[in-house]
Image (spheres, rainbow, N blue to C red):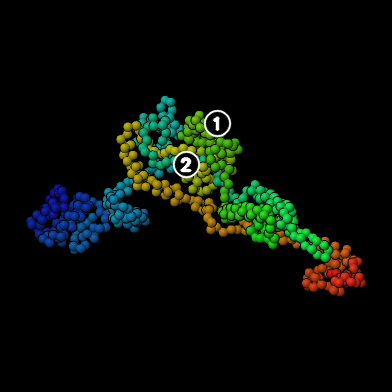
Amino acid sequence: MRVVRRIMNSTDANEFLKKLEEQDRRTNKYVILDCDPEVAKAIVTQHIRDTYMNRRNYHFLVTGLIIEDDWNSALLPHGAVNATGFQMLQETRPDVRNFLTVWKSLDPYRWPGGGTQHITTEVAQMYDATKVLLDAFNRLLKKKPDIFRNNFRRGEVYNNGTKGINCHQTPDADMAIAPLTITSARENVIDFTKPFMSMGISIMIKKPMNRLPGVFSFMNPLSEEIWMCIIFAYVGVSVVLFLVSRFSPHEWRYEDNFMGPSASNDFSLHNSLWFSLGAFMQQGCDICPRSIAGRIVGSVWWFFTLIIISSYTANLAAFLTVERMVTPINSADDLAKQTEVEYGTLMHSSTQEFFRLQSGKIPVYARMWEFMNSRKHVFVRKYEEGIQRVRESKGKYAFLMESTKNEYINERKPCDTMKVGRNLDAKGYGVATPIGSNLRDRLNLAVLTMLENGDLARLENKWWYDRSECKNGEAKESAQNELTLSNVAGCFYILIGGCCLALMVSFLEFCYKSKVEATRSKMTLCEVMINKLHTSVTGQSHVNHARFYQPATQMITAEGLSDQVCSNTHTQV
């Protein structure tokens, strides 16, 4: 007996199976379920739950594609059942396992059917169909790269219509998804969706080499003008302190001795220089001014050195631990003020049109447009040509382009370009559709939904920055970077130079004092130098080489009653 029955749901099917069971309970029954796999699973499950039926006599054949593993988990608890089906999913394939892993992690509220370990037949077929189309497009593009490219200039609108954006006139395309800037000229001939990405015109230059720290890089926190002013201030304060000490009676010391009264002043010129230097180095000095004028000079000098040293110390860490890049161009104003670095744009682009329209409104852009228009060779036909020109110009060419493209290229190898300054304007990319297209509203809704959910921002971070190839390209400004010898080499040079200068001065002083002593003691210069060298090494006077002489003066007794000449023997070393 062969029976064909159209059913609406699993209940209708099981009612029909019960009628067959009542007619003949002993013969085998072969049931072909030509329906949705979910309905077929419900029919089989409901059938084996019914204890009235002899399920061992039933053989089910499911014609639909069964790819869900939960068939076994749904049927096994109820006992054995004869069911045959077709499964097209090969779970051993790596791409299938990867897909199921991602599918399991999806949010079921945003992705219907997601968040489970199983996929339906419709999902698998849609995935395969999309993959087939993608592979077909890839083969076509490899065979003929310009198969979908019209013969037109980039986004340009002509007087007699448009050859660049012509989807409103011909049925070649229903939409255009590209880095297509929304402009008023284009809005006259096509419709745009809401901008899915914001951007502006930016400046791309070749990344300068990191400036290596110099030998005297510790002097960088203060400019050369400040260092010169500090030197002049040091000399000036020392001279002022010397003068006020000379004219102030409080700085003079008066003493009476056997040779008569004498006057002395601690603040000689070299002592004044020493006092100012000690105060500047935050050290100190054995002498201090006693007069009011001298203390005023010392106080203002101490205050001055406090501010200077504090400012120097605060900036020293940043200047020594951070390798700074010196860029010749930092803004559009810098480009407009010079002629050494050339700059240009993409021909027939919205960037070029921007400078042409703004040339009569903003002086800076007017100078830039005049400069570019007078040098036609600065314009390029392709983005790749402009980027390559920046890389090969050794810093003598800047390319004006959209900030999105600029930032993307800067994150790709060889990591030798960079964006400088702020964007010159604010625009957006939109999806282009023919005028009056019914797709525009749905595309707008999709763009707004993705913007609100943060999907577009995540995609931008994913493709621009998370997959950056230049993660170690720039030195990060961190106070934890250790110093190298080149950072502080100048300090060691000054220390070594100061020690050598001190040894030289000491030697000259030794020779000079030896000559004076030789003249006074009637000895040869060599003998005096040997005696002094012996004293310097041993710390004791060399008595064997001492000379005794009779002074010309006479000593008078303390009582003043004797005029006897007393011999005063001096030991001269």
Location of residue 562 with respect to 77 vertically, above or below: below
Q: Circle 2 sits on which residue?
A: 403
| Marks 2 and 1, how far apart at CA | 23 Å
Q: Who's the residue at 20% across and 55% down the image? A: 41
Amino acid at pointer 1: Glu
Q: Is residue 152 visible?
A: no
Kindly give the residue lying farthest to the bottom in the view shown: 544
Total labels drawn: 2
Kindly give the residue lying farthest to the right in the view shown: 564
Asked whether 459 or 273 is in front, the reply is 273
Amino acid at pointer 2: Ser
Kindly give the residue lying farthest to the top in the view shown: 160
Q: Who's the residue at 44% across and 40% down the image? A: 199
How busy is the neighbourhood of tag 1: few (under 14 within 10 Å), some, or many (20 plus)? some
Horizontal and vertical percent position of residue 511: 82, 62
Horizontal and vertical percent position of residue 125: 29, 48
Asked whether 352 or 222 is in front, the reply is 222
Helix or strand or loop: what does disc 2 sit on? helix
Q: Who's the residue at 56% across and 59% down the image? A: 482
- State which quarter of the image contains the C terminus: bottom right
Q: Who's the residue at 33% across and 36% down the image? A: 440
Q: Circle 1 sits on which residue?
A: 370
Q: Is residue 192 visible?
A: yes
Helix or strand or loop: what does disc 1 sit on? helix
Asked whether 558 or 52 is in front, the reply is 558
Horizontal and vertical percent position of residue 159: 43, 26
Q: Earlier in the sequence, mark 2 or mark 1?
A: 1
Location of residue 93 with respect to 391 vertically, above or below: below
Q: Is residue 105 left or right of residue 564?
A: left
Location of residue 105 with respect to 451 vertically, above or below: below
